[in-house]
Amino acid sequence: MDLSIAIPLIDEAESLPELTEWIVRVMNEHHFTYEIIFVDDGSTDNSWEIIESLRAANPNIKGIKFQRNYGKSAGLFEAFRAASGDVVITMDADLQDSPDEIPELRRLIIEEGYDLVSGWKKKRYDNTLTKNIPSKFFNAVTRRVSGIKLHDFNCGLKAYRLKVVKSIEVYGEMHRYIPVLAKWAGYKKIGEKVVEHRARKYGTSKFGWRRFVNGFLDLLSITFVGKFSKRPMHFFGLWGSLFFLAGLGISIYLIISKIMDSHFALTNRPGFYLALTSIIIGMQLFLAGFIGELISRNSSNRNSYLVETKLGF
């Protein structure tokens, strides 16, 4: 199969028929073999009924329905597990991503040898104050921390080599950092393509200001996990040792001072409490490193979602 097109969605009933018709037209024009995987993330409108009707008319359409809302990362994770195309395309269901970009994205993967190609919505139709400015700041920080030179990490329109999506685990709200996850998994050829951004035609945006706060917290998390998930002692042990040695050094100084001067008020010195605090913190960090070495970072049920229904699998 040439392409798997993964589309997580929530309450997008109005746009689904038009989006599907557009994708199918592009697939037929380029003679691609394909599958469209819709993941209904707990919609409260009739999105699932629309998906069922689209599936009845086109066997290339598949559907996954969550029992409740789990978030975009969960939807992408299930779609990635189900995908079987040589190239996997992700896009949003709100018609702001253009399916006409798909053939060129696929070409960059197949012919240019990229592992992942991320869309860059260079010209946007979002509110400048609430979306564009925070998004630019968010992308700048992510570029600096990750070392990946992309302008738009959060663009939903991306293309992946199949082995990439099978090698990474998207959880929580990590969909913003899939390029970072891919880099930590060993995929180095990550590219970017300027793509068309269209004004929203139906409904309203599902993202609020909290995504930026959560985004930075997730960035800290993914940076730590990427660097230290297999060797937590290298982080906790290092800082634990530094705190412990600092406290030990201060303690030795205080003990020597007490020996040299019997009138030296040991417990009245700020250094005494600083030494005690440093030793305790150092021991706690060191123990955290040992515990981290014993615990696998992947729990058995972290990506266990209540899938209510599947179509076409």
Image: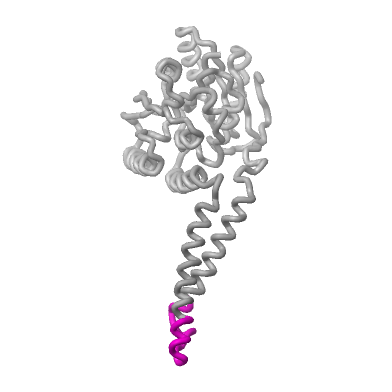
Query: Residue 118's quadrant in the figure?
Result: top left
Q: Position of residue 11 (x, y in %)?
A: 54, 31
Q: Which corner quadrant holds the C terminus?
A: top right
Q: Is residue 2 left or right of residue 191?
A: right
In this picture, which residue range is highlighted in magenta? 255-273
Q: How is the image coloured?
A: one colour
197, above or below 286, in the image: above
Q: Position of residue 136 (x, y in %)?
A: 34, 40
76, above or below 313, in the image: below
Q: Is residue 183 left or right of residue 48?
A: left
Query: In this orientation, which residue lies closer to the viewer: 153 or 122?
Result: 153
Q: Position of residue 142 (x, y in %)?
A: 39, 41
Q: Position of residue 255 (x, y in %)?
A: 48, 81
Q: Residue at the spot x=48%, y=19% of the render?
A: 19
30, above or below 62, in the image: above
Res. 54 visible in picture: no
Q: Residue at the spot x=47%, y=86% of the render?
A: 259
Q: Residue at the spot x=41%, y=29% of the render?
A: 190
Res. 157 visible in picture: yes
Q: Is residue 107 magenta?
A: no
Q: Which corner quadrant holds the N terminus?
A: top right
Query: Residue 107's quadrant in the figure?
Result: top left
270, above or below 56, in the image: below
Q: Name the outermost residue toward the bottom.
A: 263
Q: Residue at the spot x=42%, y=31% of the render?
A: 155
- Number of dots carrying numbers: 0
